[in-house]
Image (cartoon, helix red, strand yellow):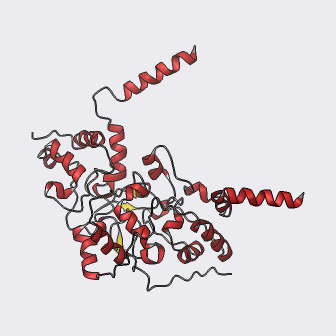
Amino acid sequence: MIRFLLPGAAALLLLAAVPAGAADLTRAARNYDAYCAQCHGVNRDGKGVNTAAMAVQPRDHTDAKGMESLPDDQIFKAIKDGGLGVNKSVLMPAWGSVMSDAEIKDLVAYLRQVCKCGPGR
Amino acid sequence: MRTAATLLAAALLAASPALAGDAALPDGCAACHALEKPTGDALGHVTGRNGPDLHYAGSKFKRDWLVDWLQKPETIRPGGAFFMNAAKPGAPRDVLDPAKLAKHPVLTRAEAEKAADALMAKTAPDLVPPGGAKGEKPNERMAQMSFGKLRGCSACHQATPGEGGVSGPELHSAGRRLQPDFIAAYIRDPQKIDPRVWMPSVAISEPDVQKLTGWLSQRGLAETNQGDAKP
């Protein structure tokens, strides 16, 4: 009986974790820790360990006012193509070789959660 | 019979040189370092490991440096194998907690020589093509500009002590530590060598790869690192 129940239970758990069509925010937070936090900070406030000598300080992702001025597609492009892709600093690398488009899309959704803001309000 | 057993052992060693090499390493290396190419969750691997992968060590390190460093280990990654494990919020910025950094065991000279030999046997020409560095004479001014303003390497690495970021390994001793071919290969495509690591593969021209490689290959060469722990 258990043998028959377990796969169903596992599937239900998976469905509960990531509803169809919704962003995988757990995966996004993991990617943020690995790739973004070194400059954008443990608390996502732009105060990462690498920022001491930076001529241009990284964006504070908790800054709702600053973040809501950015459309989602611009954030996506900045992550995928780097700062130079959106006429910003070279210090923001292009992460398109590391994360898939789907992961970057999830990261954009995660940033909206972090800033507690939407685009262009 | 004894001769037959010896011959069999020799044949087995010859048939599996990797095993023979790893067997010469001190116990415990594999607890923190991948001695074989990792499989599975690459992000989980790079964020969960306690030391750099060594499955391509023979294509990466210089033997003399290995022998010295294993006797007198010094911090190469200010934040440890994964900076987030040591990072904590602070003002005016996050700080790295040195107490979180794992201490590398200290080997005797004999142990270090033996380990270095075993590590140097672990080559990976598929990841680090021999001859990839062309031995370009470094142009200090151009290279510094490329490392900083043009390519942004300094965001994560220090090519001069105390200048630059701390989430990547320091590069002021790169010339003593690393083979030029490895430096070139890693700049060209870090994700091929270290999948999902927090250094992206970016579009960089081959002349720029050679400029940076020529410069980094000289970093720290003038210094010496004679270990104190010689027998």
In the image, residue B192 above or below residue B77:
above
Q: Nearer the viewer, residue B70 or B10?
A: B10
Which percent across, then down, holds residue A14? 41, 27
Question: Quadrant of the rendered structure where residue B208 is?
Answer: bottom left
Which residue appears at 33% of the width and 66% of the height? B165
> Can you see residue B106?
no
For the residue pair A27 and B143, the one nearer the viewer reads as B143
Q: Is residue A58 left or right of residue B160?
A: left
**Percent coordinates x, y for residue A64 in the rendering:** 17, 45
Of all residues shown, which one is farthest toward the left?
Answer: A121
Q: Position of residue B126 (x, y in %)?
A: 46, 59
B129 vs A31, left or right, is: right
Q: In which quadrant will I find the C terminus of chain B?
A: bottom right
Quadrant location, the N terminus of chain B: bottom right
Q: Look at the image and tell me whether residue B184 can be seen.
A: yes
Image point (54%, 58%), residue name = B55
Reply above or below: B43 against B110.
Answer: above
Q: Which corner quadrant of the image does residue B215 belong to?
A: bottom left
Residue B46 position (above or below residue B219): above
Of all residues shown, which one is farthest toward the right? B1
Residue at image location 46% in from the left, 61% down from the top: B80
Residue A80 against residue B221 in the figure, above or below: above
Q: Is residue B9 left or right of residue B129?
A: right
